[in-house]
Image (tube, rainbow, N blue to C red):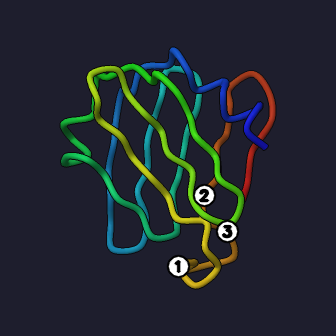
Amino acid sequence: MNDPLNRLVGMVLVAAETDAESAGFQFTGCTFSAYSGYASSQPLAELVGLTVQSVIYSKEEFVTINFFGGSSFSVSLRPCDYVGPEAFCARFAEGPWVVE
């Protein structure tokens, strides 16, 4: 699972938005939507313009996107935190969709 998400490394976050049930990100080569419980080190709008440094995936626990400069965004993968059928969906422009 971690390998496809590592494609985010080096991508720049160009847009971020949230509503009552989800958070959405547009990276330079991927659209990422979080539908489960999530946490951010700062308001999502302040992440725009940052570059992904690493992605940490912990099966059935969380996925965390770390940005250069120390900011991060985490999505819970715990079934009790799911709002719908999946926790997140990453749609890469040149390749796979990753759904958890």
Three-letter amino acid code at the position of disc 2: Phe
Type of residue at label 3? Answer: Glu
Asked if labels 2 and 1 touch by Cβ distance under 8 angstroms, the answer is no
Disc 1 and disc 3 in contact, CB within 8 angstroms: no
Q: Residues within 10 Å of mark 3 (few under 14, many from 20)?
A: some
The residue carrying mark 1 is 81
For the residues labelled 2 and 3, the Cα–Cα distance comes to 6 Å
Q: What's the residue at 67%, 39% (across, down)? A: 91
Q: Report the front residue among 59 and 39.
A: 59
Residue 25, quarter of the rendered image: top left
Label 2 element class = strand
Q: Earlier in the sequence, mark 1 or mark 3?
A: 1
> How many residues crowd mark 1 within 10 Å: few (<14), some (14–19), many (20+)?
some
Which SS class for mark 1?
helix
Identified at 33% across, 42% down, the residue is 16
**Relative to 43, residue 85 above or below:** below
On the image, numbered disc 2 is attached to which residue?
88
Rendering coords of residue 69 (x, y %): 26, 22
Identify which residue is drawn at 79% across, 44% down.
Answer: 1
Residue 26: percent from left, percent from top: 45, 35
Q: Does 10 sit left or right of 48 as displayed? A: right
The label on residue 86 is: 3
Q: Amino acid at mark 1?
A: Asp
Q: Which mark is residue 72?
A: none
Q: Give the mark nearest the N terminus, 1 or 2.
A: 1
Classify mark 3: helix, strand or loop. loop
Closer to the camera in the image, 94 or 42: 42
| Position of residue 46 in the picture relative to residue 75 (left or right) | left
